Amino acid sequence: MKYFPINKSLFVKNREKFTAQMKPNAIAVFNSNDIYPISADSTMPFEQHRDIFYLSGVDQEESVLVLFPNAPHEKHREILFLKETNDLIAVWEGQKLTKEAALKTTGIKTVYWLQDLEKILFEIMAQCDTIYINTNEHYRANTKTQTREDRFTKWLKEKYPAHNVAKSNPILQRLRSVKEQVELDLIQKACDITEKGFRRVLSFVKPDVWEFEIEAEFIHEFLCNRSKKFAYTPIIASGNNANVLHYIDNNNQCKAGDLILMDVGAEYANYASDMSRTIPVSGRFTKRQRSIYDAVNRVKKEATKLLVPGTIWADYHKEVGTLMTSELLKLGLIDKADLQNENPDWPAYKKYFMHGTSHHLGLDTHDYGILTEPMQANMVFTVEPGIYIPAEGIGIRLEDDVVIQHNSAPINLMKTIPIEAEEIEDLMNI
């Protein structure tokens, strides 16, 4: 792995929190992701399933975690199954976790090779009443591919039909949304790497550069700082491309006088950062661009103040809508008649700001979190208002990542990343 080792105490604590919420006499099973094929003998780079990583720190394929806190035999209360490694595998694929290395990484003492999974499961299934299966219930989930977890769940339910079935996901949604300090430090590291990439880009951008060249500058800096990749597919959108919310082609030339909306973030140790900045190709904002930019920045600052314990996500977005409405009125983009005639289900401001302001951030860019429950301290949220005006070729979004605090203002993990218009211009004209 490119990242430095994470102390196993994080994963020990995460397992303790999870098992404390399990039903009596139950087991929970978590699988690694597949390595997905492309064609012939080509595969996509491996990405670990975030749930097994959260609970164990294991970051390799063909791994299975079993938790059985009430197991009669202490050695079976935490079990890790790994693909058996040997000298030949080490030559062709690189070193895999040994049983000794797995203990150092995870704190789990009982480690078997994967070939023993069915035998050990047969033994412990006779000792429990309930199986926790791990389903994907994220509010944005839209998965059409059958995962390794899906296949295992199907096999398990067919093999042991008399057992009760429970779901791990509601427990994980709550646990993963509230971060430990170690996790906050890892997200901060990802944000710091993102900052390095952004500062590099500020000195690189000039008229006629290509969007993909800017993307290359980011990934160069990310890799040099132990990030293995972008946390999500990057958006480098110049001119009117910025008005396509999920523009990822990044294949146009940046023209003098236009703006570039960049929505990028580095990952570090599987933890995500998520940043949006909008900069002028020519190094200076026009008067109109600056007025819109400052309006977005003001909304971002005021929206950030609303992220406090007890806030309900839906109420928060209504308040942000009020903030944006005020700014759009000042800009002359909407008027009082628009407000009088607006559809309550699609307020007037939505014409120019049609997406949400914040989402959970963590091991996933759109991380786990139950949106109907109040916000809590140590949750991490993005704050990302925007104004999009296709008729003017202007799209501006500004985004930082913040941590909710108990009795104080949220901590901005991106506070050192340039965002004020004057600072952006100064750095681009050194």
Image (cartoon, grey):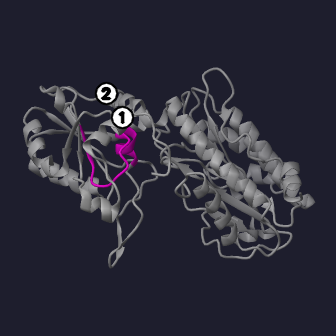
Disc ID at residue 21: 2
Q: Which corner quadrant of the image does residue 305 belong to?
A: top right
| Residue 334 in the figure: left or right of residue 374 | right
Residue numbers of the magenta segment = 50-66
- At label 1, the amino acid type is Ile
Q: Residue at x 46, y 42 (%)?
A: 368
Residue type at the position of mark 2: Gln
367 horizontally vs 16: left or right: right
Mark on residue 406?
Answer: none
Given contact means CB atoms under 8 Å apart, are the residues at marks 1 and 2 in contact?
A: yes
- State the image coordinates of residue 196 (x, y, percent, origin top left): 69, 51
* 209 left or right, relative to 368: right
Q: What residue is shown with label 1?
A: 171
Q: Quadrant of the rendered structure where residue 408 is?
A: top right
Look at 31% across and 55% down and name the residue there.
Answer: 61
Residue occupying image coordinates x 55% and y 30%: 378
Assign the C terminus to one quadrant of the image.
bottom right
Give the crowd class for mark 2: few <14, some 14-19, many >=20 residues within 10 Å: few
Of all residues shown, which one is farthest toward the bottom? 40
Nearer-the-camera pick, 297 or 194:
194
Please determine whether, in this image, residue 48 is positioned above or below residue 108.
below
Q: CA distance from mark 1 to mark 2?
A: 7 Å
The image shows residue 400 at horizontal and vertical percentages of 67, 44
Say whether disc 1 or disc 2 marks the residue closer to the N-terminus: 2
Residue at the (58%, 57%) spot, across then down: 223
